[in-house]
Amino acid sequence: MSKERLPLTLITGFLGSGKTTLLAKLLRDPLLGDAVVLVNELGEVPLDHHLLREVDEKTVILDSGCVCCTIRTDLVDELRDLEVRVHRGELPAFRRVVVETTGLADPVPVLATLLQDPMLSAHYMADGVVTCVDAVNAPLQAERQPEWTKQVVVADRIVLTKTDLAEADGAAAEALIRARNPVAEIITGVSGDVPAGRLIGLGVLAEERRAEQVTAWLDAVNHGHGHAHEHDHDHHAGVHAIALRFDEPLDWTMFALWLAMLLQSRGDDVLRVKGLLDTGADGPLVLHGVQHVIHPPTHLAAWPDEDRTSRIVLIVRGIGRAEVEASLRAFDGLAKGAVAA
């Protein structure tokens, strides 16, 4: 197996959203021929006609060559076990991982595990989060199920399912999605028919694509309205995006302390953070976080665009722009007071 970090794609979605149907179709694609797929219950996935041979009680090898395993403990144990089994020759080497969550799962802890566990972060990187959204039941689930909102907010790609049904209102479902995640690409997927290449290989945390991903995020949130500090998105359920711009270079140490304090006090309500920060170097510092977890910041050698000011977007729940700006001003005042003293 390659010593390079292997990409891991997370497929999530609320109960009945069609993620199992999507996964069954994806497993036919040669793009997943060198993958391991981890599912919560193998019996939930209709794979019988794809089954080539059973390796043990929890693992099958599909006709595409993909290995499919049941998650019976936690993700850390499963991924460690896979590597051990490859070294023993019990499983073929793999080059990517796909994890399907349960319908009630909060995907944030999975991402946090990838970023925080030393072994996993050394061997795996988050390639992207794919969320299935049921176009029929989205309005009710958005109103009543907090897990639905978390699954939508963390998504890099959203597959809108059941749009072919008479009772589906795709436009309404898309509006609900955009209210919570103005950035993710929305793909219509009837009966799971979505090309694997649109969902696999996104590279959202790959070193060479971090600036590209963050720039696209900032552009999408701002919708071309120019200055980020003039634009905000107030939407349903208190979930909205706050875009901030700083014209002067930031003191990264002080800013990191402010962000740490914000996450300590309101981390459950800070759902996503992305940004490009001017810290006085030739290139920006790239910021990417999910709730309490901030990926180790990376300095780029050069700016990816002509705009060289600090830009940050936070997708938050129940936190207003005024509250964020007041805390920043207060912290900045304390920091300057400490320096003056």
Image (tube, rainbow, N blue to C red):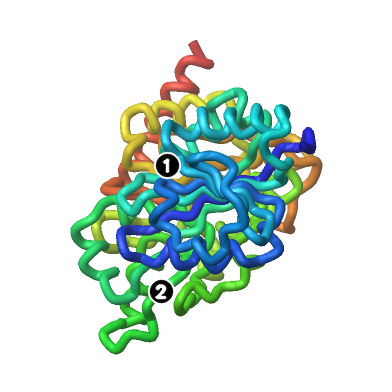
Picture layout, residue 158 above or below residue 107: below
Q: Which residue is mark 1?
A: 108
Structural crowding at the residue carrying mark 2, measured as other residues with C-alpha within 10 Å and reported as few (<14), some (14–19) or many (≥20)? many
For the residue pair 144 and 29, the one nearer the viewer reads as: 29
- Residue visible at 53% across and 25% down in the picture: 254
- Residue visible at 50% across and 61% down in the picture: 47
Residue at the extreme front: 53
Q: Dividing the picture into quarters, in which one does residue 126 lie?
A: top right
Looking at the rendered image, the disc whose residue lies closer to the viewer, 2 or 1, is 2
Image quadrant for the N terminus?
Answer: top right
Residue 337 rendering spot, x and y as whole percentages: 45, 19
Residue 167 rendering spot, x and y as whole percentages: 26, 85
**Helix, strand or loop for disc 1:** helix
Residue 179 falls left or right of residue 45: left
| Label drawn at residue 161 | 2
Residue 103 rendering spot, x and y as whole percentages: 33, 54
For the residue pair 314 and 54, the one nearer the viewer reads as: 54
For badge 2, the amino acid type reads: Thr
For the residue pair 202 and 61, the one nearer the viewer reads as: 61
- Residue visible at 32% across and 35% down in the picture: 266
Question: Contact, CB < 8 Å: mark 2 with mark 1?
Answer: no
User: Which of the two labelled residues, at mark 2 and mark 1, occupies the earlier sequence position?
Assistant: 1
- For the question of whether residue 245 can be seen, the reply is no
User: CA gap, disc 2 to disc 1?
Assistant: 22 Å
**Helix, strand or loop for disc 2:** strand
